């Protein structure tokens, strides 16, 4: 007789299971699209400051988008920002590791190159707001100095500074994105700000 | 004195933060059309990946409960129609054991020499009969 009771149980479970409606999925897709459209530009700039290459930064942002969409799109929307930036920061770290290995190999075979070669500040930041050329140039130079100073920071300080300052994330979300405690975020951020101010000097502002 | 220094430091931090944020936002606003287009394509690609995994998974799995019900029902019907009354047939190992342990078999084993002689006697009689037929 037990098979019949099993049938009844499975049937009851299948009847009470809420089907995944297409409307819910469409809504989630629209929300994710809105979220990604909102963060993608700042994420690209943050990645670009870290890796100094726009194409590489674009690849890293795309990979972060794909991973978020694949694995975490069913999470609550308030989790998306820290998750997205955690994926992106992991990607940046992996990229740096690969670069270190690549540079060692290139040096070993005698083909090491200067990292500064081919980087054009002006070409990398075209102005679309109609500012005067001298003001634009001054801002570009100031931004380039800031980027250089940021790149000189230890990795964790750099992450904390960019997520808090550029992305505007609060301490809790930054801690989630960096997979560390809120106290660590505060320490990293504070040290980063003081280090940057010292590096850039008072005339920078 | 310390309080004044702290205030100056906090003001300097705030000014630094404001300037940094403004510069960063300007650089974001200055992204060129080609880069924005690539970002847009990346976003669409990510969303299409979500289609092929999350939605695809849900579409594949939404038939599982129905398939489970069908499989269990089929199993139940199969068991119901193919079962045989248990008192008509006993398991073979038990039947063999009972055959071996039957009282007759045990007696036969005890008088094995007698049965052997009887068998030999029958064969001798048969051989004698066949010889007489030849003659």
Image (spheres, rainbow, N blue to C red):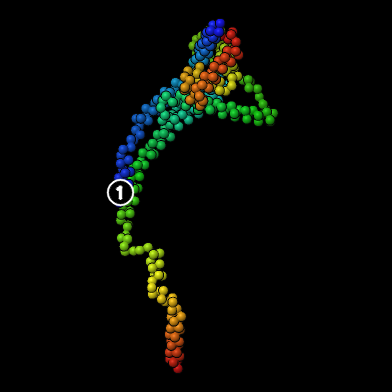
Closest to the observer: B100 or B91? B100
Q: Position of residue B109 (x, y in %)?
A: 44, 75
Q: Position of residue B76 (x, y in %)?
A: 32, 51
Q: Position of residue B25 (x, y in %)?
A: 49, 15
Q: In the rendered structure, the residue with mark 1 lies on which chain?
A: A
Do we see residue A83 in this rendering?
yes
Closest to the observer: A72 or B96? B96
Q: Secondary structure at mark 1?
A: helix
How many marks are shown on the rendered structure?
A: 1
Question: Which residue does the image show at 52% across and 10% down from the upper left?
Answer: B10
> Dot 1, crowdedness within 10 Å: few (<14), some or many (≥20)?
some
Up the image or down, A120 lies above or below B128; here it is above
Do we see residue A42 in this rendering?
no
Q: Quadrant of residue A144?
A: top right
Image quadrant containing the N terminus of chain B: top right
Question: Which residue does the image show at 58% across and 9% down from the upper left?
Answer: A204
Q: Position of residue B81 (x, y in %)?
A: 30, 56
Q: Is residue B126 left or right of residue A53?
A: left
Closest to the observer: A129 or B65? B65
Q: Which residue is mark 1?
A: A4
Up the image or down, B66 lies above or below A130; here it is below
Up the image or down, A14 lies above or below B11; here it is below
């Amino acid at each position: 007789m037990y098979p019949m009771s099993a049938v009844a149980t499975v049937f009851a479970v299948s009847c009470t299971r809420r089907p995944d409606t297409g409307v819910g999925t469409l809504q989630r897709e629209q929300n994710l699209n809105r979220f990604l459209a909102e963060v993608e530009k700042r994420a690209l700039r943050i990645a670009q400051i870290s890796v100094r290459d726009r194409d590489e930064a674009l690849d890293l942002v795309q990979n972060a988008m794909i991973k978020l969409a694949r694995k975490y799109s069913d999470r609550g929307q308030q989790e998306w920002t820290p998750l997205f930036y955690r994926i992106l920061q992991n990607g940046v770290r992996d990229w740096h590791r690969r670069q270190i290995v690549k540079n060692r190999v290139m040096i070993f075979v005698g083909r090491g190159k200067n990292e500064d070669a081919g980087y054009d500040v002006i070409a990398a930041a075209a102005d679309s707001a109609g500012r005067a050329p001298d003001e634009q140039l001054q801002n570009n130079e100031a931004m380039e100095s800031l980027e250089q100073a940021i790149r000189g920071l230890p990795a964790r300080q750099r992450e904390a500074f960019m997520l808090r300052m550029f992305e505007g994330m609060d301490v809790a979300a930054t801690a989630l994105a960096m997979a560390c405690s809120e106290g660590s975020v505060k320490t990293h951020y504070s040290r980063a700000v003081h280090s940057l101010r010292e590096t850039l000097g008072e005339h920078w502002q | 004195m310390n309080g004044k220094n702290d205030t100056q430091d906090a003001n300097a931090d705030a000014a630094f933060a404001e300037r940094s944020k403004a510069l960063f936002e300007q650089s974001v606003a200055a992204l060129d059309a080609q880069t924005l287009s690539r970002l847009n394509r990346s976003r669409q690609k990510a969303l299409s990946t979500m289609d092929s995994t999350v939605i695809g998974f849900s579409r594949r799995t939404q038939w599982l409960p129905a398939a489970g019900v069908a499989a269990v029902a089929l199993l139940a019907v199969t068991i119901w129609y193919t079962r045989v009354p248990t008192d008509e047939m006993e398991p073979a190992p038990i039947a063999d054991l009972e055959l071996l342990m039957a009282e007759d078999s045990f007696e036969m084993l005890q008088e094995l020499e007698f049965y052997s002689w009887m068998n030999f006697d029958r064969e001798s009689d048969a051989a004698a009969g066949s010889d007489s037929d030849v003659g």
